[in-house]
Amino acid sequence: MRKELEENLKKSVSDEAREKARAEAEARAAAKLKAVTEESDSTEEEKAQAQAALEAQHNEIQKLSAQMEAEMREQEELERKIKAMESKVLVGGENLLEKQELLEREAAEAAARLDAQKAQEEAAAARIAAVSSDSAVCNAVLAD
């Protein structure tokens, strides 16, 4: 989940890029309006249409800007929640995830030591059995 959130954070557009895009859109709209209004043969109707188009574009820009701000607030809230979850994993200054990994390593090492000890015990038992059988043979020879 954390990786997914980090990827989403990386994909989000920076404030500067958003502001630049908004400024460019407003500049294009203003240039278009200026070009239309400067034409000497333009009618008042065309000027009114251009003005209405500019206002519509401006409203759209405002709407998109508000949407981006809402997304930024949501992103900040998600970052805050991630930090809160991470702090819950830390107890008494100790990271529980790291402690779990340490305990798992220690358990694996203990199992390996136990396996080695069992192998030694089996080898010792085999040696005792061999010595016992040799001892029984010697006793049988001496008894004859």
Image: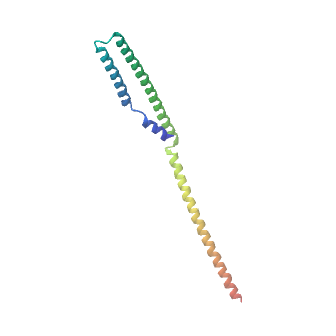
Residue 138 lies left or right of residue 39; in this view the side is: right
Residue 66 lies left or right of residue 134; in this view the side is: left
78 up-or-down from 97: above or below: above
Please name the residue shown 69% across and 88% down the image: 142
- Residue 86: x, y in percent? 50, 40
Along the line of sight, the residue nearer the viewer: 98 or 47: 47
Please name the residue shown 54% across and 49% down the image: 100
Residue 135 lies left or right of residue 97; in this view the side is: right
Looking at the picture, the colour scheme in use is: rainbow
Q: Residue furthest bottom?
A: 144
Along the line of sight, the residue nearer the viewer: 98 or 20: 20
Q: Residue furthest top?
A: 44
- Residue 125: x, y in percent? 63, 72
- Residue 84: x, y in percent? 50, 36
Which of the 4 image quarters holds residue 67? top left
Q: In which quarter of the image is the C terminus?
A: bottom right
Q: Give the number of marks.
A: 0
- Residue 141: x, y in percent? 68, 87
Along the line of sight, the residue nearer the viewer: 123 or 47: 47
Which of the 4 image quarters holds residue 24? top left
Please name the residue shown 56% across and 56% down the image: 107
Please name the residue shown 39% across and 15% down the image: 52
Along the line of sight, the residue nearer the viewer: 144 or 78: 78
Q: Which residue lies furthest to the right in this view?
A: 144
